[in-house]
Image (tube, coloured by chain):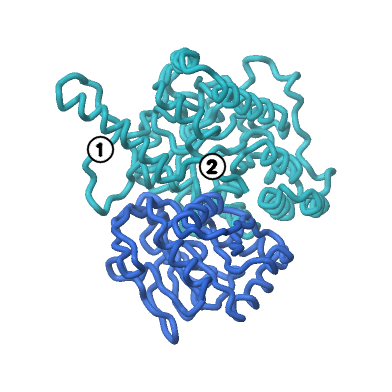
Amino acid sequence: MKVGVIAYQGSFEEHALQLKRAFDALSIQGEIVAVKRPSELSQVDGIIIPGGESTTIGIVAQKLGVLDVLKEKISQGLPVMGTCAGSIMLAKEVTDAKVGKKSQPLLGVMDATVVRNYYGRQRESFEAVLDFSVIGGGKAKVVFIRAPAITKVWGRTKELLSFGESKVMVQEDNMLATTFHPELSGTTAVHEYFLSMIKK
Amino acid sequence: MRLYSLSYSEIEEFFYKLAEFKDVLKDNNLLTFTPELQKDIPEVSEGTVRVKHAFPIFQKGGVVMDVTNVEQAKIAEEAGATAVMVLDKLPYDVRKAGGVARMADPKIVEEVMNSITIPVMAKVRIGHYYEAKVLEALGVDMIDESEVLTPADEEHHINKWEFKVPFVNGARNLGEALRRITEGTSMIRTKGEPGTGNVSEAVKHMKLMNSEIKSLVFMEEEDRVKKAREYQVPYQLVELVAKLRRLPIVNFAAGGIATPADAALMMWLGSDGIFVGSGIFKSQDPLERAKAVVLATANWEYPEIVLEAQKMISEQKSMMGIDIKTLKPEELLQVRGL
């Protein structure tokens, strides 16, 4: 199994390590591929879009022609996990809590509304304990960094986890989105769940 | 893509265990020194070390650009910067103007915060606890305790554990970097020689730090104890660096970066990302240059993409730059705050 990580910017190294740990936990012979160019996309069985700045990731991915290829692959069923900025990239509707609508290059494939910087700025960023029993994990501490929130889902998108008034983990068929950072947590539950989506 | 031996949560666990140890001593009246961390934190909490150390992770592979107004901040955002740093004057102008350089006008910082979606950072003078408190109250995303401004305290840096907002500090070598981490900073950047458009000092600092880390890895334990004393930091932190073979927090390059190739060079040397000061808005092609530096930083492993980025700019439009050798010792900014 080959899993790609979009590796321009953000928590891509953290995702790669967490992915390696998840492979070990599930005894899967897996390979991790850094994806920066369209050619690297053709080899992967699943793809992770890490946390970072969604504007930066979108601009660079568009410039190198990765965005269009990725969009097509996802709509053909390629399993994808987007965390934080990744969830913004996936959502069909994106606004900013303060600045409002902004045009930025996105994938726009998931039936969900995401509000950027929902909780505020870095000062309002926080850690919280989430219960991952819905995907077969335990309780774990996770961080929300200038996090977005998934405020609305429709169509085939289903909520997996919520925190307060918003959804923090949702799934639409082959697409998984989280607004927190499983790659910075002490649990591999989310990555293991994503690998199970690839196997199917 | 680098794979490290410890995950983020394991590194954070290390910092919390150190704090817990101090708390135990304090509970037994064996320590009067105020502990740096709180051990019993509620399930949901803001501004913890885990939250502060996480912020710069999402800057990795990115470019933070110095800006002086809203217009420049919008250009930076449009070009794909991961954050902007708001200053009163660009380092090049600080150098020319002389006098006392202080934190930027909070009104301008606030205007920038309200007009873009990416994080906003601002600089405070070394040791100026209250400029930092003011910026924290304003709500900037990260504070740069910077040698570009005139130091307010010649002896001490700010105790950064006391803040909810993460800090970034400059360092010329491993000792400086580890001392800043001990003071609670969340991110390190090389000092370079700011405002010169000359990358040579940043290269020197990054290479020195790399070789110092390498020598720690192959050192006997007793020599690491000696190193910890030399660096004036806890021995445990030195051990962590040796185990990780890198700094335990994010490490950027700064000071004199002016072109896409400069940025790629620093990434190749092991930087996690780039700060560009005067390099962009002191050039004559800021938007194109900003886009090019972003592209080169994110794709530094591919010379053909860096080439494409380098073609987007014109060398005739680069800032003139200053040869470091022509600067008098008292004109160097990097020697501030050791």
Colour blue belongs to chain: A
Q: Is residue A54 left or right of residue B197?
A: left
Residue appearing at x 36%, y 53% in the figure: A125
- Alpha-carbon neighbours of circle 1 within 10 Å: few (<14), some, or many (≥20)? few
Q: The residue marked by circle 2 belongs to what chain? A: B
Looking at the rendered image, the disc whose residue lies closer to the viewer, 1 or 2, is 2
Q: Residue drawn 36% across and 68% down?
A: A135
Q: What's the mark number on residue B38?
A: 1
Q: Which residue is mark 2?
A: B4
Q: Position of residue B276 (x, y in %)?
A: 64, 42
**Total marks placed:** 2
Would you say residue B116 is visible in this rendering? no
Chain letter for the cyan colouring in the rendering = B
Q: Do dots 1 and 2 share one subunit? A: yes
Say which amino acid is labelled 2.
Tyr
Amino acid residing under circle 1: Gln
